[in-house]
Image: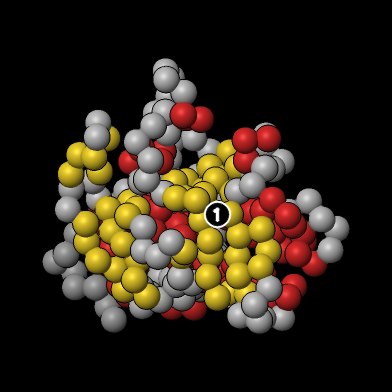
Amino acid sequence: MTRPPWLPPLKPASAEALAFGGLWAFLLDMSLLAIGLVWAIDAFAPPQDLPWKPLALSDPPGLATVVKFQRAASDPALCREVLAAGGIAFTEEPDRVAGTCPLTNTVRLRDGVTPLAPAAPVMTCPLALSYAFWDRHVLGPATQAVMETDVARVEHYGVFACRNVYGRSEGRVSEHASANALDVAAIVLEDGRRLSVLGDFNDADDGGTLMRAIRTGACDYFRSVLSPDYNAAHADHLHLDYGRFGICR
């Protein structure tokens, strides 16, 4: 097309203008590529690997599980939402003070997990969440793999105890004082066999293999996991808590 004679002649674009235009074109291409990449990741990546996807009890452990788990454990409403969505039945416990120990954000697990014995102890929602994930992704699968049966119940020495660590008169308050720790003594299998921490943990047979496996797997969901490998005070139980300190031994 011929340019009308009354229009001023076109000036060639400067090198700076061409470079600036090229930069914007490049940035636009990169933005479109990034949008497409995010869409593809969101659509096709496993949800357990994506921190913006909700935490789900049905999902296996993934790249983002730890971050999502911590988020749920720190949010009382979200903690309960994840439990309920995973098919875990629980009842609420009122906030109260027992002795000198305040009990807040507590529930009782009723169904959807391997039963505890004594049944349905009061525990914090983060501890309940940890137990549910450990039960679903560690305890059950490990027992099936090693013993070829299911777990009928988990025997424990208690959750709440208003005391300091090791029952000392002074020192740091125990996680048990806020119902935030579970002491597992034994598991009873569907076929009637009973495996205890005291009697089986250090054995070289399948029972010992299983007890050590469920201890190690607990470290993925509880913050502190103490076993006979830690000290003599834990020779007869696994201490599992969702407290402030991280240790797995």
Q: Where, quadrant-wise, is the C terminus in this rendering?
A: top right
At x 59%, y 49%, the residue is 238
User: As drawn, which residue projects farthest toward the left?
Assistant: 6
Q: Count the labels in the image.
A: 1
| Colour scheme | secondary structure
Compare residues 138 and 181 and report the one nearer the observer: 181
Compare residues 20 and 218 and report the one nearer the observer: 218
Kindly indicate the quadrant of the structure image that contains residue 122: bottom left
Residue 170 vs 190, above or below: the answer is above
At x 69%, y 50%, the residue is 198
Q: Where, quadrant-wise, is the N terminus in this rendering?
A: bottom left
At x 50%, y 51%, the residue is 157
Left or right? Give the position of 72 relative to 61: left
Can residue 58 be seen? Answer: yes
Kindly indicate the quadrant of the structure image that contains residue 150: bottom right
Residue 128 vs 163, above or below: the answer is below
**According to the image, label 1 marks what residue?**
184
Instruction: Give how far across and how far down residue 156 sits, in percent.
Output: 51, 56
Left or right? Give the position of 33 relative to 187: left
Residue 127 vs 174, above or below: the answer is below
Can residue 129 be seen? Answer: no
Instruction: Give how far across and how far down residue 162 sits, in percent.
Output: 34, 36
Query: Callout 1: helix, strand or loop?
Result: strand
Instruction: Give how far across and how far down residue 24 sits, in percent.
Output: 37, 55
Left or right? Give the position of 41 relative to 214: left
Residue type at the position of mark 1: Val
Instruction: Give how far across and how far down residue 207 sits, in percent.
Output: 76, 64
Give the crowd class for mark 1: few <14, some 14-19, many >=20 residues within 10 Å. Answer: many
Compare residues 230 and 78 and report the one nearer the observer: 230
User: As drawn, which residue projects farthest toward the top?
Assistant: 170
At x 40%, y 76%, the residue is 112
Residue 25 vs 198, above or below: the answer is below
